[in-house]
Amino acid sequence: MSTTLPAYAELCERHQRMHRLSHLQSIASWDQSANMPPKGNEARSLALAEMGGLLHQLATEPVLKDLLACAEQENLDDVQRASLREMKRVWRSSNALPQSLVEAKSLANSRCEHAWRSQRPANDWAGYLENMREVVRYAREEARLLAEDSGLSKYDALMDQYEPGMRAAEVDRVFGDLRQWLPGLIQQVQDKQKGETVMQPVGPFATAAQRALGQDAMSLMGFDFEAGRLDESAHPFCGGVPEDVRLTTRYREDNFLPSLTGTIHETGHARYEQNLPRHWLGLPIGQARSMGLHESQSLSFEMQLGSHPGFAKLLSPLVVKHLGEQPAFAADNLNWLMTRVERGFIRVDADEVTYPAHVILRYEIERALIEGEIECEDIPALWDQKMMELLGLDTRGNYKNGCMQDVHWGCGLYGYFPCYTLGAMYAAQWFATMRRAMPDLDARIAAGDLAPVFDWLKSNVWSQGSRWETPELVQRASGETLNPAHFRAHLQARYLGA
């Protein structure tokens, strides 16, 4: 322990201990979703709730208040000051919640998510609703306590856990503008694409071949298989810890693209985690800054790169290698397949033009739900109304492809959904910045040179951890704070040639 900065050094030791226990919690949670037999769920849920309670105890020990105050008076450098800022943020949000709520919430979330796995395929909204009511009750209580402590609205208090500093007023402004021009753009793109002939791949596509294809795509994008792995789950996600990143995807034998694009998406998350600054490992400053920035990495991989015509040239031989020779697997056709704009029910399978509509719908519903303006029973009717309004699709009675399709609400992840479209906006801003600095970027991607993209992301985002608050990180990386105009320009350029 440092003798010159004793309080700060002890805080670091305590946070590193919490990180090690969080490591076990993360792997146990991944296993619950990917490998655990169904009858193990109750015991695993209780174990995870117990671990959540233990971590909460460690994060709220009374001595931390004095250590934080003493560290504030120590001769810290700028990085240590930023580290202390993040420790205070963790301490404050942890102390706003009682341990009993943390444990009860964890248990309710685990039970609801586990039941959802069978209830969703069965279109069993009534069964899901029983569990979801309890999840929402705990989420509202968490929101109330965090709001009382922070002075924020209930929804803002939850969103702040995922996107620190972001407020619903700003999301409303950005999404309100998006709502105005997005439906027209979707129609324009669909009208343009009507005249294009696209060959459809002929299946079936064996799961084992799709898995091997996904792993090759991950290697192409720099994933370190010595520090992570790919598995299968009911809903794709990226979990684990920076030292051991766990990705999952899901497979359909009639269509290989959802699995491939989902794997590429999760690889973006994974590379962010694998490249976080190791010298800050275990400290809050060493964590990813926000989920909006996290989604900017997954969407940089899946959309900015994955739907790039030059990237299709790199994917095409991999697809042929694993799925066999077909005319549909030619690079041009593969790119056309990956950039089809279609109004669909499923968010995770949506193209990048219609995707924001899915996010706006969920944001508007979950905000009203947390603020107490609606109840769980109101969700299906609101979903049907907004799906028709935003995408022109009828979801009445189709719960499994409607309001039950995502795992987030059953897992208590309220305040997360805006991060997806904020992430798409950040990703467009990153690539606009790269193109200004490297005018030949698109030619280099087409030539198979992805290093300029990964090097830029590592230098400007991955290696920064939580050193800077989000607006400053974005300003330092791109020369301006979040500017949604880059996202609109990207979509118009790629899909309309404008």
Image: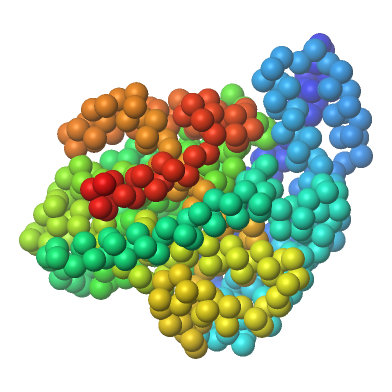
Look at 53% across and 62% down and name the residue there: 360
Residue 485 horizontal/vertical position (percent) = 44, 43
Residue 265 horizontal/vertical position (percent) = 40, 51
Does residue 27 appear to the left or right of 188 in the view shown? right
Residue 188 horizontal/vertical position (percent) = 29, 62
Look at 76% across and 15% down and name the residue there: 76
Seen from the viewer's position, the closer of residues 290 and 481 is 481
Seen from the viewer's position, the closer of residues 316 and 311 is 311
Look at 49% across and 86% down and name the residue there: 396
Please identify the quadrant where the N terminus is shown: top right
Does residue 259 appear to the left or right of 204 in the view shown? right
Look at 30% across and 25% down and name the residue there: 438
Q: Quadrant of residue 124?
A: bottom right
Q: Is residue 370 visible to us here? A: yes
The figure's colour scheme reads rainbow
Residue 220 horizontal/vertical position (percent) = 28, 41
Q: Quadrant of residue 137?
A: bottom right
Q: Is residue 322 visible to us here? A: no
Q: Quadrant of residue 18?
A: top right
In the image, residue 70 sits, relative to residue 26, either above or below, namely above
Seen from the viewer's position, the closer of residues 263 and 142 is 142
Does residue 293 appear to the left or right of 111 in the view shown? left
Total marks in image: 0
